[in-house]
Amino acid sequence: MNLEIPGKFAPLIDQARQVAREVFRPISRKYDLAEHEYPKELDMFASIMDGMNDGAADGGTGAGKLARSDSNGGAGNRNGTNMKTVLGLTELCWGDVGLALSIPRQGLGNSAIAAVANDEQLARFGNTWAAMAITEPGAGSDSAAIRTTATEDGNEYVINGEKIYVTAGERADAVVVWATLDRNKGRSAIKSFVVEKGTPGMTVERLEKKLGIKASDTAAIRFDNCRVPKQNLLGDPDISVEKGFAGAMQTFDNTRPVVAGMAIGLASAALQKTRELIALTGIDLEYHHQTWTQPAVTRELQLMEAELEAARLLTLRAAWMADNGLPNSREASIAKAKAGRVGSMVTLRCVELCGSLGYGETELLEKWARDSKILDIFEGTQQIQLLIIARRLLGKSSAELK
Amino acid sequence: MTRTPVGFALSMMNRLAANPMLDRLGLRSPLEKTAYHGTRAGFRTLALAGREFKRVNQWLPRKRLPERPPAELFDLSLTDDQQMMTDTLRRMAQDRLRSAAPEADETGTAPETVSSAASELGLALYAVPEAFGGVAEHQSPVTSVLIAEQLAWGDMGLATALLAPFSVAQAITRWGTGEQQSRYLPAFCEDEPPVAAIAIDEPTPLFDPTNLQTIASESTSGYVLNGLKNSVVLGANADLLLVAAKLHGQPRLFIVEGGTPGIRVKPDPGMGLRASGPVQLLLEDVQLPAEALLGDDDFNYQTFLDCGSLLRCGLAIGTSQAVLDYVIPYCNERQAFGEPISHRQSVAFMISNLAIETDSMRMLTWRAASRLEQGLPAHREVALARLLCSEKAMEVGTNGVQLLGGHGYVKEHPVERWYRDLRSIATQSGGLHA
């Protein structure tokens, strides 16, 4: 048993940390204030990242590489792409979550493509920057209730509907859209389609103004008789019961640990900064056996550190299971639930502990406390994670435990 | 609050009703002072040692178990040995501890069946190096944590009793001089290992194990101990005790054999862990030889405490897992408003959170243990694990009872015992060493 990060990932972590420190942090406040402005600094960085990936002997890292390993542990213990991606993104989000979400070709759509695309589609879309469009004005967590339709017409599907909260929806080269082939057939009729930028009938209606992650654009997109070739349907076009939807949802087993990692990176930035600021007051921050006789702030900092460490290790566990071909749906949701709430708790408490200094824009603490909230919402809210965990633990269907 | 005339009258009535004779003679007030300087009523001398530890003339050199070589990869899987051990202990926890727990809790002792099962298992062998008759080849805090986890899944009180001698053996293996190891460790490998325990806690609020009130002073022949220890596991029948005391301002451990004059005990039952037979230990001018001071030049009290905390975290995980495993079938079977209560999110989410926090404790504890095992600095990791366990174990305990409602509050179900046991994670310091 070993819960240390393997030494072979040290260069990757160091690189990501350099990027976070030298690229993201210096422009972090700039794009928080200039919402919707494209962070052009990222283009050059994205090329560097592509280069790093293509050169990697062991399959690289990133949103487009995430997939569950086929091996069932037969080849011995593995630390692979899932863990690497979690570790890399954790470091990047120590720099800035909004900017990390804006890195070209690292969209959630890329993970979906990686998870369900066939070889022909991988060849066509593998290097596309793909955003993910699931949420609608009337359907958020309840993905099965989406109303966007895809109607077969000759060699094409005709997509109609409205999508909101599409991360990088304007900047990405393509959008992976969830739509139903038949509204009467429930979740099994829901499929995902790649719609490339510039396809007639697809319009970015507006960009949202948000509480945080302002560097990341969040688009509302309308599909009005938008035609895509049949080959752009990802995965199996058959409406077989549950299978298709389950496949799409499986993407989340791989992406949830990554989002958990993002929350951990962000929260550790806040905690680190807060510790530094509080250390300047001369308060004893040592780890004692009796914590109740230490200053309240010391105990609180240590409790936050413990919670954050727990979230981090739960996240590594979920990624490790994915790397080793072990089913990890429950563990992925445990990681996401824990990291999401710990991220919010830590960043908010850090602002509180630093008082008006933490609340003001001089430091990034208040920004981090705004950024963190989304990480407990997207990729499945806290409550959705608890629901998934509970259903797994209790052996309940979604009809029984609603 | 100032006492009004009405309050005074109520108080008088209450006291008179309770025991008029006592109050008329003015005896209650002194009796209420239970602290060291009050009465010593109730203490009795420690039972004469059933076992003698012969002074060894030809003692072996000090043996320190090697650390495990650093691992290259992140890996949560157990070794074959660990898996086998875990499975065996889970069966024992299921078959023996679970059924024995209610009565052991009532009587305050571990039944014979449990102790014999434990001796068959030879737990202490895993703590003792081969040179002294055991089977330990490496330092193995991870295995120790796994052992604690499984035993506490059965019952934390019994687990505490079973782990007490194991912990003493671990401590002497880790810290003892060659003379101490040669003298005491072979006994732990016999068919009937000695009853042994570590005494650290003292009856004071905000107790800090690094700031002890029990004092050791040097004498011509060795040391003299004075002080009061509480929550000492198995203390009434101990053949061997490791007692924490301040020597020249620094906390140290002293090896005290059962028959040593000057030691008196009285039962010290608490909220939970009752099966572990806790006692208060009154030490009055206890004369110890010079070789009673545990440890050599490499003794580190902080690491000693860390090893204890780590094992306690193992207990927290085990009992928390027991709670989780119990409430799942209960909430699936219990009907209310025409369906199982587990169909309600307010119930289901509590169960999700039990799982999340139990796994949180487990991950932090495993990491701390694995660092210790590899010889990496682990004080921070142990401190964080203990802090988290202190917080979350009780949360699990209280929510476990809550999920069963009124049924959780009565002794028909074990959750009320687990609730009481889980409070101890944050309060106890002694008795354990990984």
Image (tube, rainbow, N blue to C red):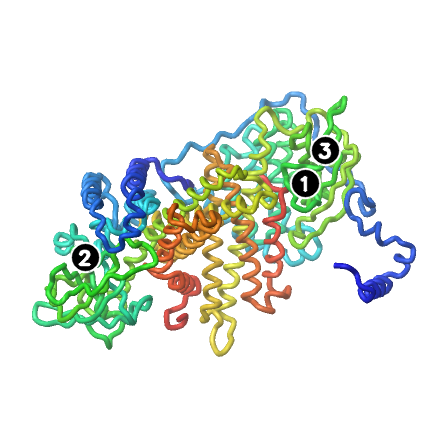
Task: Please report the residue visible at 58 percent of the width from the left and 22 percent of the height from the top.
Answer: B61
Where B334 sits versus B106, above or below?
A: below
Mark 3–mark 2 distance (CA, rounded to whole Å): 72 Å
Task: Please report the residue visible at 11 percent of the width from the left and 60 percent of the height from the top.
Answer: A198
Cβ atoms at labels 2 and 1 below 8 Å apart: no
Mark 2–mark 1 distance (CA, rounded to whole Å): 64 Å
SS of the residue under disc 3: strand
Where A157 sits versus A287, above or below?
A: below
Question: Residue A188's spot in the image, x, y percent?
Answer: 25, 69
Are the residues under marks 1 and 3 on the same chain? yes
Label 3 chain ID:
B
SS of the residue under disc 2: loop
For label 1, count other residues whose C-alpha is less than 10 Å away and answer few (under 14), some (14-19) or many (20+).
many
Q: Amino acid at mark 3?
A: Ile
What is the residue that sits farthest to the bottom in this orientation?
Answer: B338
For label 3, count other residues whose C-alpha is less than 10 Å away and answer few (under 14), some (14-19) or many (20+).
many
Q: Amino acid at mark 2?
A: Ala
Which residue bears the numbered disc 1? Answer: B195
Question: Residue B46's spot in the image, x, y percent?
Answer: 77, 40
Q: Assign the C terminus of chain B to one quadrant of the image.
A: top right
Label 1 chain ID:
B
Mark 1–mark 3 distance (CA, rounded to whole Å): 24 Å
Depth check: give the residue in front, A29 or A22: A29
* Side of B409 where A384 appears, left or right: left
Mark drawn on residue B365: none
Residue A146 position by quadrant: bottom left
Where A34 sits versus A380, above or below?
A: above
Q: Is residue A276 visible?
A: yes
Are the residues under marks 3 and 2 on the same chain? no
Q: Assign the N terminus of chain B to one quadrant of the image.
A: bottom right
Which residue bears the numbered disc 3? Answer: B215
Which residue bears the numbered disc 2? Answer: A117
